[in-house]
Image (cartoon, grey):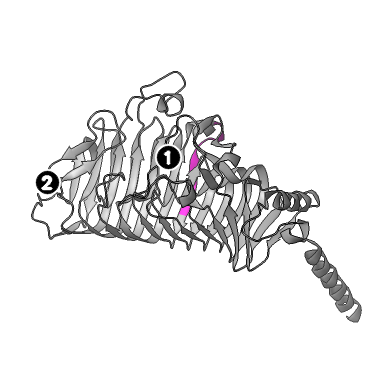
Amino acid sequence: MRRISFIIIIASLYSLLGMAQSVYNVKDFGAKGDGVTDDAIAIQNTINKCSREGGGRVLFPRNSVFMAGPIELKSNVELHLEATSTLLANPDENIYHMSAFGKNEGEGMLWIYANHAENISITGRGAIDGNGIAFMGAELEDSYELKPVTTFDPRPHPLTLIDVKHLLIRDVTIRNGAYWTVHLVGCDDALIDGISLLNNLKIRNGDGIDLDHSRNIRIANCHITSGDDCICLKNRREFEEYGPCKDITVTNCVMASRSCAIKIGSENMDSIANVVFDNCIIKASNRGLGIQNRDEGTVTDVTFSNIQLDCRLWSDVWWGKAEPIYVTSYPRANGNHKDANWRFPKGEIEGRCGEVSRIFFNNITAIAENGCFIGGDTDDKVNNIYLNNVNLRLVDRGVYAGGVYDKRPCKGEGFVSGKVYGVYTEKASDIYVDGLKVINERKDFGGDRN
């Protein structure tokens, strides 16, 4: 018995020693952490050594600001930010040269990224700060101006993870993104848990979490504020080799957006399927729950349940007209000089849209300036939509005239005009309603149209 206990103690000591040896403090590799020096080289050297030696924890110690340019994460590395430590994007636009979308350089550059890796973790109570305002133009009442670009946009994406297997992002604060903030491309088996993702509500294109051609993803217990979509599922054409986006769960999150808080689309050249959003709160958003299919891909078997919504119109800068529920499939507008290269199949400038089917809304409670909109370009493109126990309170906040539904980006007229209805449909079929309740406090209410 004593011999067994002795062996256990020795094994535990070796385990503790191994854990101590696996911590790589970036300051030991020359990082200053003074908020002025660019620490990218020192941080990259730390990550490289950690991965090369079999993996471990790359530590950003407390009470430090590590300003840095682009950083590549590697397999078997945990990036750990202690409380009061910050990893800050260098505000110099000239140092960002690697496109976040491969050959498409028109939509931002990489800052912190990984490519073809596994077993990556980002943890701790510290912050990753994208320094977003440094890359913006003048501040307007409802947004920041975007600096003029042609085919090259230098704005850095804070975190882009491409073809990463077994990913964990937990507890950290990620804030002030200048473009898409957390972008998972072709990832498999990821958990994003307990993070605070706090973007400036005036920064356009400042998405929170984008799941792109990814699968087996869980997002839970997060607080997200974002000028653009808080959580968005899509299949971008630049990454078509990674296949469909599927098997996604989002639970116990609180969100606020100037665009659509939870969105599927608009870019979708493959299929999005087997998705659950449950037990969430959405505050002060331009649109609540949105399926915005604008390409040939399909959206099927999606469930939204137990969600509290507050939708209000902020500005026409943002897509949406305060629709709490939005289910659509329309072909996008013909391509311009930028879109023709990336929004449509190669060599084409005119698109088509795929089916949206088997979409379930269960136990949804909403306060909104507008009703739900369900529509497609043909009578059967959007079908089998279920509204079960949906409670709408339609209010007049004195800003929005009402009765306009936003179809953008689409071919032809981008808006449907009329009165405010609880549910407005356009060329959709097999819509099942059980327990819809509409409390009207608007003068321009037109009644339910199903």
Residue 169 seen anywhere in this rendered image of the structure: yes
Quadrant assignment, res 16: bottom right
**In the image, what residue type sits under mark 1?**
Lys
Bin the neighbour count of mark 2 within 10 Å (Cα to Cα): few under 14, some 14-19, many 20 and up: some
| Disc 1, SS | loop
Which label belongs to residue 191? Answer: none
Point out residue 196 in the picture as x, y percentages from the top left corner. 49, 62
User: Residue at the spot x=25%, y=30% of the render?
Assistant: 378
Pick out the residue farthest to the bottom: 2
* Residue stretch rendered in magenta on the structure: 241-249
Pick out the residue farthest to the top: 347
User: Residue at the spot x=83%, y=68% of the render?
Assistant: 17
**In the image, what residue type sits under mark 2?**
Lys
Q: Is 112 part of what is drawn in magenta?
A: no
Residue annotated with mark 1: 147
Q: 322 or 219, which lies in front? A: 322
User: CA gap, disc 2 to disc 1?
Assistant: 37 Å
In the image: residue 286, left or right of residue 68? left
User: Residue at the spot x=33%, y=49% of the render?
Assistant: 140
| Disc 2, SS | loop
Residue 80 sits above or below residue 385 on the image: below
Point out residue 384 in the picture as x, y percentages from the top left corner. 29, 42
Disc on the earlier residue, 2 or 1: 1
In the image: residue 261, left or right of residue 70? left
Residue annotated with mark 2: 419
User: Residue at the spot x=27%, y=49% of the render?
Assistant: 315
Point out residue 144 in the picture as x, y percentages from the top left corner. 37, 48
Point out residue 5 in the picture as x, y percentages from the top left corner. 86, 78
Pick out the residue farthest to the right: 3
Quadrant assignment, res 6: bottom right
Q: Is 246 part of what is drawn in magenta?
A: yes
